[in-house]
Image (cartoon, rainbow, N blue to C red):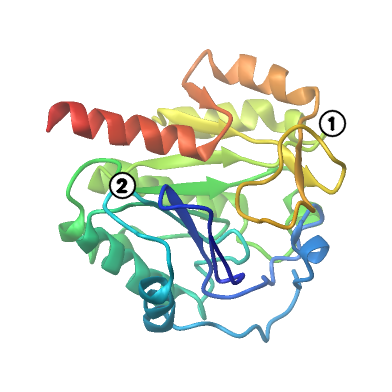
Amino acid sequence: MIDTGYLYAKNSDRIFINTCLGCNGNCSYCYLPNLGYSNKSNSLTVRKASQIIKDIEESKININEKTLITLGCYSECWDEKNKPQTIELIRHFLKKGNQIQLSTKKLITVEEIEKIQNLIKYIGQLVIFVSSASISQWKQIERNTDIPSKRFETFKISEELNIPTVLYIKPILQGITIQDIELYKQIIKKYCMKNVVVGSIFKEKESEETVHFSNKNKLFYNPVSDELEIKRKLMEICNVYSRSSEVMIKYREKYLEER
């Protein structure tokens, strides 16, 4: 196992990578303060991609082509400071043949991803998850993030480059997220989206399942009753998943079947 904050992996199945520890998004539901990291700092230290790659290579984790790379659980990986390192990591692991997923509350443009498109070997090797817990109450809940209408333009990447993008409705905030269900449906239809993840909030209240990106046993999945209703309504127009990893597995299996 490796657990440095910047890197976390129990085995070679999946490795969580962070180019910095903390975020400046200042989301009201953020779990980072519970882990000792800031969620409203503009002076966070960014770790270079080259150092992260070196740390992985020197670790006891045997990273191979089957290893899923997850970027940004402890940071906003598309902040201006983080972005160059995130792109370098994406390029590195695409060349290695790994699947890569990242989630963001920032706009990722077609032009930015177009520069690395030639490194992608199959549909679903790179999947971008655009996170949103609320649309109408964005200013109060996700204070220092891109306005939803702007970050949703990331979905154009699917249309223009055939690289999967996924609406990541996470976390579900009881009584809040569900108010925007019709707005979410409009976004799904507008961008012809196939896949949506409806995810639980992470809290210190113990439950049957701890988070997968930390070994500290401080955060747990805490489902709320609204999740089932949101899933039921969205299933009418798209595929709905509870975990981002389920989407990644689907694309990987399809690739292996067709290979």
Residue 194, image x and y in percent? 40, 28
Q: Height in image: 3 above or below 49?
A: above
* 209 vs 41, nearest the viewer: 209
At 64% across and 36% down in the image, what residue appears? 199
**Which residue is labeled 1 in the image?**
175
Task: Look at mark 2 in the image and give the residue it sits on.
Answer: 66
Q: Is residue 53 left or right of residue 42?
A: left
Residue 223 tag number: none
| Image quarter of the C terminus | top left
Residue nearest the viewer, comparing 47 with 151: 47
CA separation in Å, label 1 and label 2:
39 Å
Residue drawn at (84%, 31%) of the image: 175
Task: Name the residue at 23% across, 66% down.
Answer: 115
Point out the tag, 1 or 2, that comes first from the N-terminus: 2
Q: Secondary structure at mark 2?
A: loop
Residue 90 coordinates in the image, percent (x, y) = 33, 64
Q: Secondary structure at mark 1?
A: loop
